[in-house]
Structures are given as C-alpha cells and as structure tokens.
Amino acid sequence: MLIPWIYFIQEDEQLVIESLTRRRTLNGPGQYVAAPLQRVTRRKGIVLAPTEYLRVRNTLTGELRNVLGPTLFFPTATEEITEHLEAITLKENQYVRLIDERSGSIRVERGPASVYLAPTEEILDDVSEGINIDEHTAVLVRDTTTGNLELITEQQVFVPAPNQEIIEVRNRIRLEDHETVIIKDRAGRYVFRRGSDEQRSFFLDPYSELVTLRWSSGLHKDTKGLWITHLDLRPKFMWYEFEVRTQDNVELVLGLTFFWQITNVQSMIATTDDVPGDICSHARSVIIQSVSQVTLEKFLASFNAIIRNAVLQTHDPFYLERGVVIHAVEGRSITCKDPGTQRILQEIIQETTNRLNRIQKQESENEIRVKQIQGEIEAEEMRGHLLESRQEHMRAEALMEGGAEAQRVHSFLEGLGEGLAREEKIAIFNTLRKGEVLEALSAGSAQLYFTPSDVNLSIESRQNGKSHQR
C-alpha cells in the first residue's frame, strides 16, 4: 500500500508535478496531495525588481518572451529561464542602438527611459552620449539607405536616427589673420581659405577635406615628421645643418638659420609638398658649390657673405616658383668634421677672440684716459673761471673800499675848515693815521721797530741851567 504525500505550498512557491505522461505546475498558496508514481519538485518563484526582466523560452516551440518586473514570476511546466537581465537606463542626453537579429532592423532608444531588449534584439553599440551641436560643432552623418552624406549644423542635442551613421564630429574652422588652409572639394580641386577673407570661420562641406602637408623636420631635414593643415604666412625661422668641403679639402659641418616666408600658397601647392625640405636641399646645393671655390681661411673671414651670395641670388627663380621668399640666411655654427682640424680651428678662433678682447680692452682704456683728460680740461677751465670771478670780486671790493676811504678823507679835510692850508690838513690826517696804526699794533702781540727816519725825535740836554736841543 502506497502512502500519499501532502504538500503545503507558500505564496512564493511552486510545485512541479511530473507523472508518466505529463508535466505541470501548481502555484501557491495551497496544498497538494501527490498521487502514486508522481514526482513533485518544490521551487521558489522569481521576484523581479522594476528594472529587471527575464527572458523565457518555451521548450516545446522554442519561442522566446520577456517577463518584465516588478512581479513574482512562476514559469509554466514548458518554460525555462534563459537570461536574467537588467533594463538599460538612459539619461536625458543618452541613447542606445539596438538590432533585431531576426529581421535586421535597427531601432534607436533615447533617454530618459528604461530600455528592455526584445527577445531577438541585441545591443548594436554601447550607450552613447548625444552630441551637442552648437555654432562651433557639427556632425557629419551618412544615410545608410541611400549612402549620402549630410552635415548637421542645426543647434540641438543630436541623436542619430536608425538609418543614420555618424561619420565624424566636425569643429568649425576659425582662421587667424595670418593663416591659410587648403581644402580639397568633391571634384578634387583645391580651394584656398584665408584668415583675411570675410568668411574666415566655416564648417567643411560633407565631401570636402583639409589638405594635410607632410614637411621635413629636424636639424638635418631627413624625416617628414611635421604635419601641417594650417599654413602660417608670417615670417619664420628654420635651422639646418649639413657638410661642406673647402677648396683646400677641409670638411666642415655648417649650421644655418633661414628666415623665410610663404607668399603664394597657390604656387607652393602646385610645385611642392615639402617646402622646408626643398628650401634646405636647394640651399645646400648652391652653398656646397660656393664653399668649394674658396679656402678655409677665406671662408672663415667672410662666411656669412659667401652664404648670403650663394642663397640670395636675385636671378634664381627656385624660391619664387615655390611661392616662398628667403628674407635672410646666416651661418649659425661652423665645426670641422676632423677632430684634429677642429682643435686647430678652435685655437685660431681663441687667438682671434683674445686679440679682439685685447683691442677692445685697449680701446676701453684709451676711452677712459680721454674722458679723464677731458675732465681735467673742464676742471681747469672751471678753475680759471673761478679765479677770474674772484679777481672781479676783489677789484669791485677794492673800488668800494677805496671810494669809502676817499669819501672819509674828503670829509675829514673839509671838516678842518678853510683856516688851514691843504698841506697842513694832510699832515694832521697822516699824524692821526699813524696814531691809529700804533694803537692797533699795541693792542696785539706784535713787536714794532722804528727807524730814525720813521720818527722825529728831539734830545734835550741841560747845562748850567740852559737847555740844548739836538
């Protein structure tokens, strides 16, 4: 006797009941009494969040379907879960491209949204940001149904349609006053746009492209490592170094500095794709010829003149044909390839430098001496002016003192009245002056000696009551 099993089922549980001929399911809540020869399996239902979903396949028909959350899902007896997926969450400016593998059609979902893939859909591209199109940015797209290119310039957050493919994001080209670009149009013709034009800011047309020039770079111009799209029409410098040989068979390494400028872009693009390489190669050729005709001594004495005469030949149309002009060329360095010759050359240069330094030092000393002499001359001239000024002042002072003295004497003589003769008045004046002098001398520490001629002495002697004067 077989004893039946009783199963009690919770709300989130499911029984899978298998007999000899069929398979079915029973969802809770509830209870089930299993019959003999039945196999019962208990399993939990699947709880799906709002952004989760399941991909379920019918094992009898192979059909796929999606089960979207939020829900508690119980598969049927003929269903199996193939994938547990998460919805694609898109922000405001995001989008995703999906492809239906059964039909090949493409659809584009734009945010904000939660995207659930259909059973036969796959993600064609990763989630992408929409492209902000403004006055400086445009998008070049291709219509996949017709193959045509279109430049989208209308300001928006651009999300491609299902039949559109983004080729590139193009920035507006804004040229400065000194810049020029070369554009190859749909027919392969060159179009020149300059910063001096009225339309100096523009987008490239769908079938146009900027011409990129590969110019030689480096000190020896042996590699084309400079990529140029915007041509600078201002004068510019360029260095170049190469080997030359003098008439007396001395090998030199010559370094040059070119000061050059592009003047005609049309001529340049028509004749060359490597302007620096052409300039340096041509200059090297003519300089080698010129240096080979002079000795080392003569070359060192006037190397800049030899270089300029070789490069800046007025009858040479080479640079004009390439739309460039060489404003100046100067020797930047000269070294001998042979180390022994280089040492001798360095000694010659050092001796020449020392001689120039000595000459300059002597000239400086001479200049200082001349300045000293000029200073002494100016000092003597000023001293002469000072003496003349002093003499003039002393003369004026003497005249003033003499005038005052004369006025005093005149007043004194007039004050004696008219009763005395002029000689007597003068004698009185002289006597008073002598008294003043004697008084001044006696007030000091000076010793005064009088000779008989300076004084009028009388010696009296008395004899027998009578006086005798001598």
Image (tube, rainbow, N blue to C red):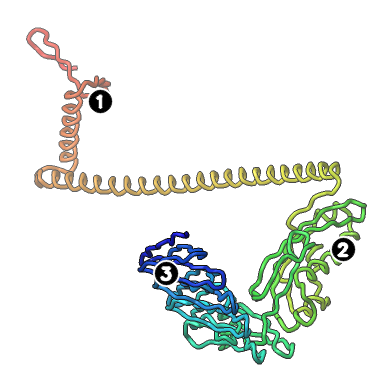
In primary-sequence order, the first of circles 2 and 1 is 2
Residue farthest to the top, as pictured: 464
Q: Amino acid at mark 1?
A: Asp
Of residues 93 and 19, the one nearer the viewer is 19
What percent of the width, then of the height, locates residue 20? 56, 69
Question: Residues under labels 2 and 3: Cα distance?
Answer: 89 Å
Characterize the local packing of mark 1: few (<14), some (14-19) or many (20 or more) Cα atoms within 10 angstroms. Answer: few
In this rendering, the label closer to the viewer, 1 or 3: 3
Residue 176, by quadrant, is bottom right
Of residues 52 and 350, the one nearer the viewer is 52
Residue underneath mark 2 = 290
What percent of the width, then of the height, locates residue 409? 18, 44
In primary-sequence order, the first of circles 1 and 3 is 3
Of residues 59 and 191, the one nearer the viewer is 59
Residue drawn at x 50%, y 83% as measured from the top left: 158
Task: Examine the rendered structure and indicate whether residue 220 appears above or below residue 123.
Answer: above
Residue underneath mark 1 = 454
Label 2 SS: helix
Question: Which quadrant is the C terminus positioned in?
Answer: top left
Horizontal side of 136 relative to 327 (left or right) equals left
Residue drawn at x 28%, y 48% as measured from the top left: 399
Q: Is residue 324 visible?
A: yes
Q: Amino acid at mark 3?
A: Leu
Horizontal side of 380 relative to 223 (left or right) equals left
